[in-house]
Amino acid sequence: MPSAPSTPAEPVAAVAAVAAVDIAEDDEPPPDEGTGNRTRKASTSAVGPFPASVDAGQTESLRSRTGGRVKTALADGAAIQKGTIIVTFESGADASELATLQDRIASLENVEGEEAKRDLKQARQKLAALEGGQNAPPVTSSMDGVLTGFAVVPGAVVRAGEVIGKVVDGAVASRVRVTVVRATRPKAGQKVMMNLKSGGSLSGTVVAVSGRSVIVDPGSEPAENVESVGF
């Protein structure tokens, strides 16, 4: 007697595909009652918190183009404006000093040893600075800010191209900088939550956005007290 035909087994791949669809549908958030659209919640990595640091702001390195003997100089920490004269140079060099330097250079030119070579280099640089400083233009600032790392005093000899200090944006100490992920999408004027190193939190305001770099105004809270920022 012939046996009844058996029902073919459902392919394993098909079962797996159905299961995958069921799982994917279960993971989908429910549709919005008003629009019918499904809206996923933003990842916590997009809102932070992100580590904070004091904003370094804009800086300018001060250099002397020609060098020379300093006649006048401002004090370190001085608040300056764009175009402020920071250093001026003597209009002429002392003939006896130039002659002394020339004699020293001549005496060192044929001396062996690292120390002699170093002394020769310094003497040549000083001679060039004094000779070039006779018509040296003053050193000025190209931005508003505060003079920092500046130790030049009247009577000192500055070499051509030597960095003698910096001008930093005077407002930087009151701002916080954070680097966010692309999904954060911060905007100027946005309110953020600042977590403090001492504990607790305060509200801050985004004042500038450049790519993933965000500048936050912490209000009356010192910027160095802010540990992280959440969006």
Image: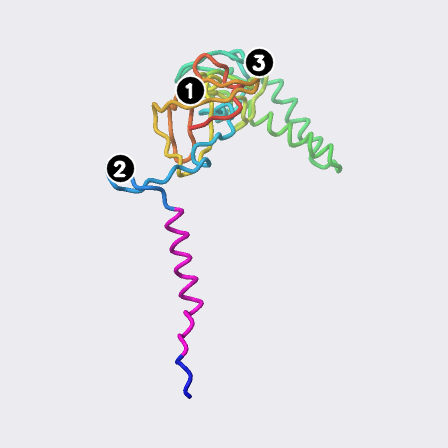
Structural distance between the alpha carbons of marks 1 and 2: 34 Å
Name the element at disc 1: strand
Q: Are marks 1 and 2 in contact (CB under 8 Å)?
A: no
Q: Position of residue 77 (x, y in %)?
A: 52, 13
Q: Position of residue 203 (x, y in %)?
A: 43, 18
Spatial CA distance of label 3 from label 2 is 74 Å
The picture quadrant where one finds residue 210 is top left
Relative depth, front residue between 139 and 203: 203
First-in-chain label (1 vs 2)? 2
Residue 153: give its label: 3
* Residue under label 2: 33
What amino acid type is highlighted by mark number 1?
Answer: Gly
Mark toward the start of the polypeptide (3 vs 2) = 2
Most distant residue in the bottom direction:
1
Tell me the kind of residue under disc 2: Glu
| For discs 3 and 2, the disc positioned in front in the rendered view | 2
Q: Quadrant of the N terminus?
A: bottom left
Q: x and y percent of residue 194 in the render?
A: 47, 22
Residue 7 included in the magenta stretch of the image: yes
Q: Which residues are magenta?
A: 6-27
Residue type at numbered disc 3: Val
Q: Quadrant of the C terminus?
A: top left
- Per the image, the residue denoted by label 1 is 204
* Residue 211 figure quarter: top left
